[in-house]
Image: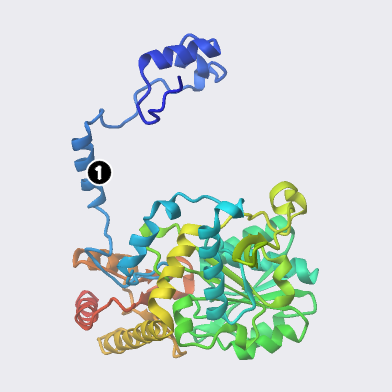
Amino acid sequence: MTNLHRYIPMTEQNRTDMLATIGVQSTEDLFRDIPEEIRYRGTLPMSSAMDEFTLLGHMKKLAGRNADTGSYTSFIGAGIYDHHLPVVINHMISRSEFYTAYTPYQPEISQGELQAIFEFQSYICELTGMAVANASMYDGVTALSEAGALAAGATKRKQLIISRTVHPEAREMVATMAHGLNLDIVEVGFANGVTDLAALSQAVTTETAAVLIQSPNFFGCIEDLTAIEPIIHGVKGLFVVSTNPISLGLIESPGKLGADIVVGDAQPLGISQSLGGPTCGFFAVADHLMRRMPGRIVGQTTDIDGKRGFVLTLQAREQHIRREKATSNICSNQALLALCASIYLSTMGKQGMIDVANLNLQKAHYAAGQLTMKRGIKMPFSSPFFNEFVIKLPEGTSVKDMNLRLLEAGILGGYDLGQAYPELAGHMLIAVTEKRTRDEIDHFANRLEELA
């Protein structure tokens, strides 16, 4: 009779039986193909075995060494943000029918999962002003690189132009993708914290497949999309915009400003920071590009009885079985995290999105005002910004050293821009979300002045 106790640990008899079945004397025999001289023979530097109670205590102690946003006041963003997470989100995604669902290949038994994805797609279309959205991407960075690949395939051109105001990690990912597809990447510089439009105009040619812009950009500044759109569309290229979804509660959607592809990271929409991930990317396009979208799309239909139902649709089989002919090798999605975003958006509603975006905007501007009143602290850019902005510390001040001292005061300081932009050494990228209080902002500004 089959053993139904699936989670009982393996016994020594089980081990002996399995070794006998495959014809070896010991576990060590399984590694005999590895040359003796390169095998590790010592004891790994780790603790001895612990009982459950001791192990839980040990892990809790290790976790307590993390400078998390539950015990520290965070002013760091740069792609992962400390937003409020409505408690209903964790309650909903903890339901076993959601967190154990893998992939909805069989629509007849996956209607709940498919509907959740369909709702996510619908929300993303509403936010971005685009016609069609997919079931989600791995994160915002890979979404942008896939947008570049789509643009190259759709236009049959080999050049992508990307602004240096795009997140540094996203630019690295785009470059990696471009290398595999033999695409040329041209980076355009910035002026006053936004894309240099004169340099962009000179860089764009009839060989340009797309211009890739982030707005609000990595510095938090709002790009002039209406000025960029005619530059790329004038040569019949595609306009790709990466955006912060929270900002769309206030700012006009990229779709209404002429974007052909809109991507971004859904992390601000109810997804926890989780020490850096995982997150969820969104990807939306204009009508004429829908059949070139990577990943999967859930469509709404009716069954033979006329009842509403959901199916996977418009997905090429090549993405699963003929990978070399695929428009993209991404054939999965972040269903559980897309559900987080859907629950967040449904909980907030239209007015809630406007309110939270406004709180981010107002609190960031209050913080900027308080910081620039302090001795030696300046704002190098005067362009409009959303919930992030750049400050310049007093001459000779190390951002790294400053952040270590702020950490001692219970504050997670801003991102050191000198790491990705050598010309901005001594500059700090500050993020202020709706969670930051006036007292926290004032304390941060005062502490920064004292330490500087």
Q: Quadrant of the N terminus?
A: top left
Mark 1 lies on a secondary structure that is helix
Q: Quadrant of the C terminus?
A: bottom left
Q: Tell me where residue 156 sits by quadrant.
A: bottom right
Determine if residue 169 is in view. Answer: no
Q: Tell me where residue 415 sits by quadrant.
A: bottom left
Q: Position of residue 194 (x, y in %)?
A: 53, 84
Q: Position of residue 271 (x, y in %)?
A: 40, 65
Residue 44 against residue 98 in the figure, above or below: above
Number of numbered discs overlaid on the protein picture: 1
Q: Nearer the viewer, residue 375 or 411?
A: 411
* Mark 1 neighbour class, 10 Å CA radius: few under 14, some 14 to 19, many 20 or more: few
Q: Is residue 366 left or right of residue 33?
A: left
What residue is rendered at 19% in x and 36% in y?
54
Q: Position of residue 229 (x, y in %)?
A: 66, 86
Q: Is residue 118 left or right of residue 56?
A: right
Residue 426 against residue 198 in the figure, above or below: above
Q: Position of residue 363 (x, y in %)?
A: 31, 85
Q: Residue furthest front?
A: 305
Q: Which amino acid is tagged 1? A: Met
What residue is rendered at 77% in x and 53% in y?
325
Residue 1 against residue 195 in the figure, above or below: above
Q: Is residue 258 left or right of residue 434?
A: right
What residue is rendered at 23% in x and 37% in y?
55
Q: Nearer the viewer, residue 411 or 79?
A: 79
Q: Is residue 331 left or right of residue 422?
A: right
Q: Tell me where residue 263 sits by quadrant.
A: bottom right
From the image, tell me which residue sits under label 1.
59
Residue 403 against residue 360 in the figure, above or below: above
